[in-house]
Image (cartoon, grey):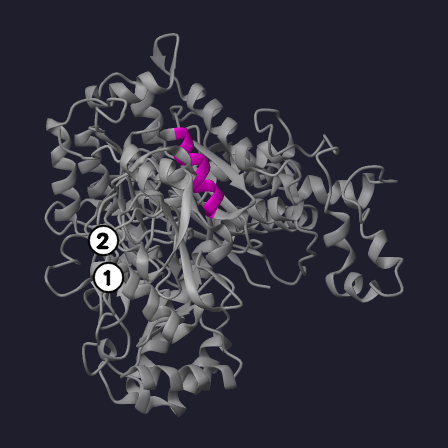
Amino acid sequence: MRSLTVIWLHASREDDARHLPVVEHGMSDAFRDFCAEAFNVRMPLEYPPLKLTTVSSADALPDALFIDGDPSRGMTEGGDDICLFMVDDALYSGSVRGVLLKDWLKTYLPAIPKVVVTYPGNAPVVVPQRRWSKKGAEVLANPAVHHERIVHLFKSFWLPRFWSAMRQYVQVKAGTNWHTPGHNGGNAFSASPFLRGLHEAFGSMIFRSDLSVSVESLGDLSSPEVQTPLSEAQKMSSEIFGSALSRYVTNGTSTSNKAMLMTLLKPGEVVLVDRNCHKSVHHAIVTSGAVPHYLPSRWNARLGVWGPVSLADIEAELAKTATMPERRVPDASSPISSRPRLLILTTCTYEGVLYPVWEVARLCERAGVLFYADEAWAAYMGFHPFYTHTDPVTGLAMRYNAVNERAGAHFAVQSTHKTMASFSQASMIHVSTRFKQLLEEDASPQFRWLRRRFALNGHGSFEKFTHDLHEFLRYWHSTSPHYPFLATLDVAGVQMRLEGMKLIDERLKWAAEFRARVAAECGLPEEECFADLTDIAGGDQDWSGAGFLKDPLKIVLMLRSPAACAAFRKALLKSHIQWEKATSTTILFLVTVGTAEEHFEDLFRVCRLNRELIGCPTQVLDDGGVGGAVAGQPVVLPRDAALCDGEFVTLESSVGRIASQFLVPYPPGIPVFVPGLRITEAMVSLVKGVIETEGVAAVHGLFCRGGHAPYYVEVLNRDEGKRLECGITLVP
């Protein structure tokens, strides 16, 4: 067990030598009781689980929390363990180096709960409704008397509502089950002479907690409006992640994308999207009936990875919207000509490139376009100050996490299971407070279309938007969700609020030490062993100066050649080490909240034994036509192309035809054939190259018999193609 830190911005008093230890031990006793109830964990009495650290002035906070007072340098010992911030009421209105205290905390410690300690006779203070609380100084001064009040305060910050209610039901209230699922609390396994081992291996709790919506007291994912432990858990996640609304999803971010795009877009409306986004975004565009306009792609042939879209390209596409008319319904005689309604970007990218979300949001709002961030790979960024950018000219600090209370995306979808502590498929949707403001206020004329879209009694209504989102979520949710999935979503956010600072700080330090050790072992500069921002994005511009950042928790090891990369992968498998993704010259290692320090030692051992393989690729390889193949704009609405009467043709004879299905090669995992795109020779060559090197199974969607040629793909028949091709364009 370890102690967590409570930082108290506290004006010194004469009796502090006696007073402060009483507060520390009283809070620790309450914390022990809270943990026993909330997590079923008994903490030893030998030491206080909460350490109280006082800071006498707001200006001293940076030095107390950050190394040399600089957030980019990492956290101090004690600062990395912070779980609670308290401030005396007389100091609440103060500033930290010229920035109001509450704004400074919103930037650097957004998820940490905060308490204003009030004293008799002082002027009352008004605190924000979310993430802040007030507590009288007499409560802390007499913790034995007010023990239950302090425990209740901790529950308001850290109690996982759904998990606690579900555990209570399973362990205390559950009796004989006459409802789904059919294994009946695991009885079907434990009573079987053949399947007992499965029950023992998984443990009884996973089966007993696999409940049904028939247990109304816990809540139903399809009825989030009803007040239940499940709806309360989602409200708490909204508070933790700083959103106006958060929703749990049990079939991954793929489902989140589909429900959100169906909510936000109408058939025929244009969405600006990075061509190399996840295939679920392409699927969502098809199901919503929207028209994709692909942003310029940046394929890095040397490393075999996709770079980000440049700010210049984003700004250029958004600038076109000023001269575009409002949406017209397309038909054969009236081509689509519509202002884009949505911009979709993946941040961070697979290899860890983060967009300056505040700048993208500014460009979008100026154009009347909503900003939608697929944040599947970086749900943790709101829990550590490393993910903050300080403008060198203005000194203004901004966050990289997409949905935040300063400036960022209007929506974010996160694969909680990818990098945080939840079960696979567990995902969250977050809607920003800024979107709510744009929807409900009339101050932004460029978003009149949005207020009409979700209008109630003639005004933009967040309740109407929420209703529509819930309805489309019901299209995609199972009516029998896996309750343990939901419990891990509940707990994952609470864990990050309670100890996320420590978890991320440790892993940032471990990753930095690992990269330095490998570089020293190889006798090379670190940038010749691991791909940095410029390596991934390309050296044609100053990406860092534009606010882009490489996430250090995505470790991209470079190998000298495809042969070296293949040999290194064999060495990893021999050592029972599994990586996240590999290209012909790189291997991606994903650092998550569950990555242990010894994992780095295991990986370093392989690097040391194979150091001659590590280094920048020595030549630029043939890109296999990827840059040219993953290009072009649709000529038929993707939804129409996907749902029309198509025909199977051989892969070779599909050139010039219009695709009615997806073909998704792995690697690189980006759709090459997309419904509505005209097929080119480059597309066919890329798919054939993947078949030759990786096998036919590496191309999702390809039809063949027995795994052998000929290979078939579905295209529009010629009559349908002529009928549906309606001159899709983004210009009036």
Q: Distance between the residues labelled 2 and 1?
A: 9 Å
- The span shown in magenta is 253-263
Q: To which residue does mark 2 refer?
A: 631
Q: In this view, does 44 lie above or below 604?
A: above
Crowding at label 2, few (<14), some or many (≥20) Cα neighbours within 10 Å? Answer: many
Front residue (pair 630, 129): 630
**Label 1's element?**
helix
Location of the N terminus by quadrant is bottom right
Specify whether 731 is left or right of 140: left
Q: Magenta includes 685?
A: no
**Label 2's element?**
loop
Q: Which amino acid does label 1 sit on?
A: Ala
Q: To which residue does mark 1 refer?
A: 682
Q: Magenta includes 258?
A: yes
Q: Which amino acid does label 2 sit on?
A: Ala
The image quadrant that residue 165 belongs to is: top right
